[in-house]
Amino acid sequence: CPPLFEGNAYESKDAERVPPSLHEAIAEMERSEVMPEAFGDFVYGHLLNMARQEQIIFDNQTVTDWELIRYFERG
């Protein structure tokens, strides 16, 4: 775990940032050594599988704002 952060995280250039996408968050979760210890292997595996399933659904069924704007421009 990183050390406790003190100060204003919004203004700090040194604060660790959360992953900007679910893909990157899942990759971080897969590399985590803390989560399996904290939740146990069974719950950790369940949470990881749930995140992967949500990503698959998002990738296959979601129309993004970018797509709406881009393709309505061309219409």
Image: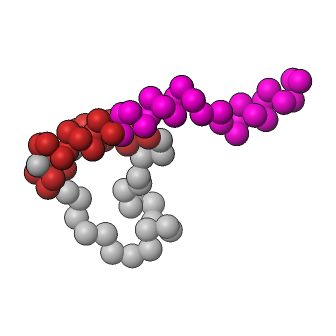
Residue 33 shows up from this direction: no
Depth check, front residue: 9 or 40 = 40
Instruction: Decide: is 32 above or below 52.
Output: below
> Which residue is rendered at x = 80% and y = 26% of the image?
71
Percent x, y for residue 59?
52, 29
2 sits left or right of 69 in the view: left
Q: Which residues are magenta?
A: 51-75
**The magenta stretch spans residue 54:** yes
Percent x, y for residue 48?
28, 39
For residue 29, what is the image quadrant?
A: top left
Q: How many marks?
A: 0
Q: Main secondary structure of the magenta part?
A: helix
> Which residue is rendered at x = 87% and y = 23% of the image?
74
Instruction: Classify the position of the C terminus by image quarter.
Output: top right
Depth check, front residue: 30 or 41 = 41
Percent x, y for residue 64?
65, 36
Instruction: Decide: is 7 above or below 39.
Output: below
> Which residue is rendered at x = 71% and y = 31% of the image?
67
Instruction: Classify the position of the N terminus by image quarter.
Output: bottom left
> Which residue is rendered at x = 47% and y = 41% of the image?
21
Percent x, y for residue 4?
25, 69
Depth check, front residue: 47 or 30 = 47
**The magenta stretch spans residue 58:** yes
Instruction: Decide: is 6 above or below 2.
Output: below
